[in-house]
Image (spheres, grey):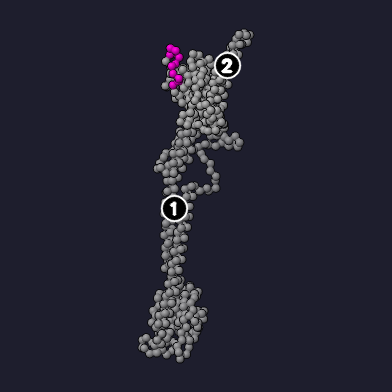
Amino acid sequence: MTTDPTTGRTTDPTTTTEPRGGRLSARLRIVAWVLLVVLASLAVVTVVTWRLSVRETDARMDAALRTEIDEFTGLTASGRDPSSGTPFGTVDAVLQTAITYNLARPNEKFLGYVDGVFRFQSRQASPVLLSADPAFTRLVGSVDAPTSGQYASAAGEVRYLAVPVSLAGAPGRGVLVAAYFADQEREAADDAALLMVGVGAVTALLAAGGAWFVAGRILAPVRSVARTARAITETDLSARIRIETGRDEMGDLVGAVNAMLDRLEAGAAEQRRFVDDAGHELRTPITIVRGHLEVLDASDPDDVREAVALVDDELERMNRIVADLLVLAKAEQPTFVRPAPTDVGVLVEETLAKARGLGDRSWGVVASVDGLVAALDAQRITQALLALADNAVAHTVPADRIVLGASMEGGVLRLRVSDTGPGVAPADRDRIFGRFARGSGTRRTDGAGLGLAVVGAIAAAHSGRVELSDGIGGGRPGESGPGATFTVVVPWRAS
């Protein structure tokens, strides 16, 4: 449980707070979007299919009406009754013969009018009696030219084609009408559309079920991430996500999150060790100072002088520890180094001049970089070389040699500090670069073990590294130590 200092509220880090108000889960949103896409697609397909079917039906009805009229014209073109071969005597006979010989299809009707009055119709049953519809009679009963159109009857739309009929020498003007009940003829298209709607509903339900299942499988790693995140606390970063997916995007996500947790756990562990070690290193001089001050005899000048010297020495050691800690803290910042054009040869010579004050040793320089200018942070590189030189002094005696060197090899700049001391034990070669680590052969014990860590941080800030190898050879007289060479390797960048 944690308390927010600004609001005073107590929260549990293992639970999550989500806004209330019926917020849909990701799984439901995925299902909703899949349903929306499926329904929209089915609606478009159904409407387009239905409209095409209706258009095809209307075209077929219009073609059938024209065909019926053409057949009537061919039947009566000779002016004789096809059953008896005798000439037609009246317009009524022409209409009756035409309607009798033309068989009406389902939903089709033939009607005959003489002088605007209904006279004949086909025997095919129809939804309504157009012959008894005065409005339809007025519309088609007296046309004097072929006329087509649509009429809204009690049974729905009627598509018709009316053709005037006359007979030479016979009284009266007739009209032959071929009509289709369009709504009834379109019922097949409507039924097909309804069937598609039913099938679409079933398809949508299946799609929703499939989307629910698939979304659950896809979001399972995400839920695992959330559960793992809730299980992680400030003191326990060991929880990991189980990888149940293949090498897909979710698998990559799970792998990336687990790798991030590994880094966080390692960083937190390193931070705890660092804090513990720093506290221990700073606590030691404080304890020493306090212990001597508690037994100090203020009336004894010699005791006071010794105590002051000891306190000054311990404070100086604490100052070095704090300074190194600040350098390591700043190493994480992007402005830790500020590269600028630097003459490498001059930099090494100036560093050697400063290093001579670290101890009475046989100092030298070996450089093959005369006139070489590189983009370096001169102050940080000098700090690293002086730290290596100070480390060399700690492991050597006045009879030993310490040499600073610089060279260009394979496109990288190598800045080294070599000595003729006893060297570094194989067991210590990896360990000594850690924070607060000391080699087993260290002669001076007042260091905090941060020097090589600072050098590594400076090299890393220059996109480089620190290498350890044997020294310049020979060792000191009477000993066979190989010495040690610490090399700061950084990529060469032209200024």
Q: Residue at left 50%, top 48%?
A: 24
Residue 389: x percent and y percent? 51, 20
- Work out which residue is located at the far right of the displayed protein and give it: 299
Q: Nearer the viewer, mark 2 or mark 1?
A: 2
| Label whose residue precedes the other's in the sequence (2 or 1) | 1
Q: Is residue 287 visible?
A: no
Which amino acid, mark 2?
A: Asp
Q: Residue at left 48%, top 52%?
A: 33
Residue 380: mark: none
Q: Is residue 204 above or below residue 100?
A: above
Picture quarter with the C terminus: top right
Identify the secondary structure beneath mark 2. helix
Where does label 2 land, which residue?
Answer: 313
Residue 286: x percent and y percent? 57, 19
Q: Is residue 80 above or below residue 43?
A: below
| 200 and 434: which is toward the camera | 434
CA–CA distance in space, label 2 to label 1: 77 Å
Q: Is residue 236 above or below residue 62?
A: above
Which amino acid, mark 1?
A: Ala
Identify the secondary structure beneath mark 1. helix
Q: Residue at left 53%, top 24%?
A: 348
As for residue 42 lying within the magenta part, the answer is no
Where does label 1 land, which residue?
Answer: 208
Residues rendered magenta in the picture:
470-479
